[in-house]
């Protein structure tokens, strides 16, 4: 998506300025985004409404820019973000995913015990080192604050996992979902996902859920006056906050 959008902007501006897009979060290949946020330095005289319409004519059918908004110089789509929100959709009906939603819904041939999944999910909330659930990147921290991990089932049998955190490391969401699906089908006990947080390397026994069931649905930002401070905080390398003695 990033390269496609940069190319379209370059065509519109005819090379007048270099285009370098910064996005709120780079998703794994095959993951969807309905709430992605990006920033780029563009000429001040561009009309936002005109630009949205012009982009709609150039972009492929599976990429759309819904709005263009001027932002303060301190805004950084990646580092100013407070949290990201994801949804993971799983069809548990015998016939699988509805054809109109098959692109963003995984067909799952096993029952999911949502009571067990909810218990296991609670043990993962809070700030932890999620190294067991992340693909290693040299020099990158795997400490994250997981703020929401909840599950619902609709009348058609579609189970949706909602995940929110200040940030997610590479493959973290899909690994969390994969681990919890193993709990939901009875292959693992409810305390297993949280027990993996004690590890400082990736847990190879954790299955990574398929990419196409995952969608980035929203990114939250602080008020304009707090953008620079938030970016500074995000750039600091974090270590887990010690658990107070009981």
Image (cartoon, grey):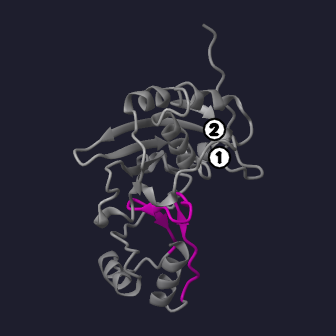
The residue positioned 74% from the left and 40% from the top of the image is 201
Looking at this rendering, what residue extends furthest in the left direction? 155
Q: Are marks 2 and 1 in contact (CB under 8 Å)?
A: yes
The residue positioned farthest toward the right in the image shown: 138
Residue 242 within the magenta-colored segment of the rendering: no
Is residue 33 placed above or below 114 in the rendered structure?
Answer: below
Q: Residue furthest bottom?
A: 14
Residue 143 in the image, given as x and y percentages of width and height: 64, 38
Residue 156: x, y in percent? Answer: 24, 49
Depth check: give the residue in front, 51 or 8: 8
Q: Is residue 18 magenta?
A: yes
The mark total stands at: 2
The reply to whether residue 114 is visible in this rendering is: yes
Is the magenta region chiefly helix, strand or loop?
loop
Q: Which residues fall within the magenta stretch?
A: 16-41
The residue carrying pointer 1 sits among few (fewer than 14), some (14 to 19) or many (20 or more) residues within 10 Å by Cα, namely: many
Q: Secondary structure at mark 2?
A: loop
The single residue placed furthest to the top in the displayed view is 246
Residue 151 on image: x %, y %: 37, 38
SS at mark 1 in the image: loop
Image point (77%, 49%), residue name:
139
Q: Quadrant of the C terminus?
A: top right
Side of 137 where 47 appears, left or right: left
Q: Which residue is mark 2?
A: 130
User: Which quadrant would residue 71 be assigned to in this image?
Assistant: bottom left
Can you say whether 10 is above or below 126 in the image? below
Residue sitting at 48 percent across and 65 percent down? 38
Location of residue 160 with respect to 26 vertically, above or below: above
Give the label on residue 134, or none: 1
């Amino acid at each position: 998506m990033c390269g496609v959008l940069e190319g379209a902007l370059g065509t519109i501006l005819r090379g007048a300025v270099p285009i370098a897009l910064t996005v709120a979060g780079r998703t794994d290949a095959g993951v969807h985004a309905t709430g992605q946020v990006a920033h780029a330095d563009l000429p001040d005289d561009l009309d936002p409404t005109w630009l949205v319409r012009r982009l709609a004519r150039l972009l492929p059918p599976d990429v759309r820019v819904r709005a263009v908004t001027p932002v303060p110089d301190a805004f950084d789509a990646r580092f100013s973000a407070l949290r990201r929100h994801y949804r993971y959709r799983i069809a548990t009906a015998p016939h699988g995913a509805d054809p109109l939603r098959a692109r963003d819904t995984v067909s799952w041939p096993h029952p999911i015990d949502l009571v067990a999944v909810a218990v296991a999910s609670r043990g993962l909330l809070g700030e932890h080192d999620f190294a067991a659930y992340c693909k290693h990147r040299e020099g990158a921290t795997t400490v994250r604050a997981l703020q929401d991990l909840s599950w619902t089932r609709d009348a058609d049998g579609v189970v949706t996992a909602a995940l929110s955190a200040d940030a997610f490391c590479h493959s973290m969401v899909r690994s969390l979902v994969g681990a919890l699906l193993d709990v939901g089908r009875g292959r693992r006990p409810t305390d297993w996902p949280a027990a993996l947080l004690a590890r400082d390397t990736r847990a190879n026994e954790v299955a990574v859920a398929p990419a196409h069931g995952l969608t980035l649905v929203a990114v939250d930002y602080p008020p304009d006056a707090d953008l620079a401070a938030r970016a500074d905080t995000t750039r600091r390398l974090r270590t887990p906050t010690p658990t107070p003695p009981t």
